[in-house]
Image (cartoon, rainbow, N blue to C red):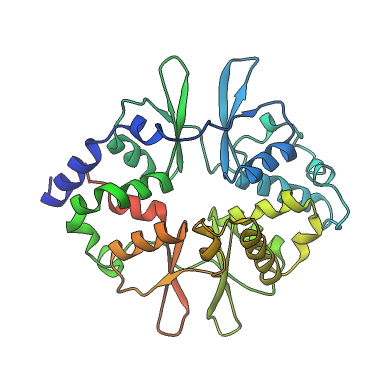
């Protein structure tokens, strides 16, 4: 094992998963027999992007529900129907998907993007980042052997902990540039800002990405639309938004965020910016700082002409920080 991997292993192995869930608020759990629309509204109202689904009849967890699952339902309905009108209910539109029922139990991880995975409170963060590095899991439920839930560790939760407590122990790697580490995905999935929202959802679903760059006709980046932006559909209950341009939809989202944010809360200032970017010469350290400060799940790497050439996710950062076995 290299000196760098030894350094990373020591840092991750010193922390238990249960430590990260000690201060978490009460966990939101979705009943398997609740309606999809009401469950997703619960996600939006509580400012969370996913929640475990519990089947009381079987006394077990079926999986996770997240916005990507709703996108899959909306797209399934679109294949069999028309773009919704503004006064059409979300329930009616989704039910046109035919093979899908409206109960949450029939929508658990239909997007195949967020399988249910759990670790014991005694497990270390080394175990957690190794799971995240597989690319298939973005959230881990911390659960005792008796089935008691202690909380959820997301990739973002872990990155914030790195920022607050572990950066000095990872100095050897975080001082390297993105170019040196060769992290991130390319080419960047992108769409003209005038395209309808439904097109962006189709791209995210097809490529299993959580974010799409919005570009101008010359290829320069002007914005970003992500899965978390789907929450507006539940707050407004206006499916006509799906036919709005991405540019208009994102502007509405940002105004909603500003209106709902407290002046003392960090989002009140960060919500106004349409996207976050760095040059390819940026260090991993600076990317971590920017992600945590802006509460962003993705950072675009742009060239000298403001064209997106790569996208770096929180998962990419954690993979770079995971020691090789």
Instruction: Indicate left or right for 276 with 1 as reference.
Output: right
Q: Is residue 59 above or below residue 207?
A: above
- Residue 64: x percent and y percent? 56, 35
Quadrant in the picture for the N terminus: top left
At x 72%, y 29%, the residue is 34
Residue 245: name its quadrant: bottom right
Quadrant in the picture for the C terminus: top left
Q: Nearer the viewer, residue 19 or 172?
A: 19
At x 81%, y 40%, the residue is 95
Residue 304: name its quadrant: bottom left
- Residue 88: x percent and y percent? 87, 51
At x 46%, y 43%, the residue is 138
Residue 314: name its quadrant: bottom left
- Residue 150: x percent and y percent? 44, 27
Q: Residue furthest front?
A: 264
- Residue 168: x percent and y percent? 20, 53
At x 35%, y 55%, the residue is 317
Instruction: Indicate left or right for 83 with 232 as reference.
Output: right
Q: Is residue 191 above or below residue 211?
A: below
Q: Is residue 245 above or below residue 116?
A: below
- Callout count: 0
Instruction: Indicate left or right for 119 with 44 as reference.
Output: left
């Amino acid at each position: 094992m290299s000196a760098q991997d030894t350094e990373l292993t020591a840092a991750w192995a010193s922390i238990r998963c249960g430590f990260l869930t000690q201060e978490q608020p009460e966990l939101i759990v979705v009943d398997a027999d609740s309606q999809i629309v009401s469950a997703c509204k619960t996600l939006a109202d509580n400012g969370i992007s996913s929640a475990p689904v519990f089947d009381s009849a079987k006394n077990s967890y079926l999986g996770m529900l997240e916005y990507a699952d709703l996108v899959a339902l909306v797209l399934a309905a679109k294949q069999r129907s028309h773009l919704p009108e503004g006064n059409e209910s979300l329930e009616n539109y989704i039910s046109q998907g035919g093979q899908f029922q409206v109960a949450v139990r029939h929508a658990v991880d239909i997007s195949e993007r967020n399988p249910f995975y759990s670790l014991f409170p005694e497990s270390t963060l080394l175990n957690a980042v190794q799971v995240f590095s597989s690319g298939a899991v973005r959230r881990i439920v911390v659960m005792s052997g008796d089935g008691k839930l202690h909380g959820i560790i997301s990739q973002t939760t872990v990155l914030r902990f790195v920022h607050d407590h572990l950066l000095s122990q990872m100095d050897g790697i975080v001082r390297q540039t993105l170019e040196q580490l060769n992290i991130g995905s390319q080419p960047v999935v992108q769409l003209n800002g005038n395209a309808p929202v439904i097109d962006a959802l189709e791209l995210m679903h097809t490529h299993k990405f959580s974010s799409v760059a919005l570009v101008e006709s010359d290829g320069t980046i002007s914005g970003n639309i992500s899965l978390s932006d789907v929450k507006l559909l539940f707050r407004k209950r206006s499916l006509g938004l799906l036919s709005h341009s991405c540019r208009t939809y994102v502007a509405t989202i940002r105004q909603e965020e500003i209106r709902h944010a407290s002046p003392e809360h960090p989002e009140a200032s960060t919500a106004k910016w349409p996207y976050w970017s760095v040059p390819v010469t940026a260090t991993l350290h600076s990317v971590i700082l920017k992600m945590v400060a802006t509460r962003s799940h993705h950072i675009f790497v742009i060239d000298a002409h403001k064209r997106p050439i790569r996208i770096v996710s929180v998962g990419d950062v954690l993979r770079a920080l995971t020691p090789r076995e």
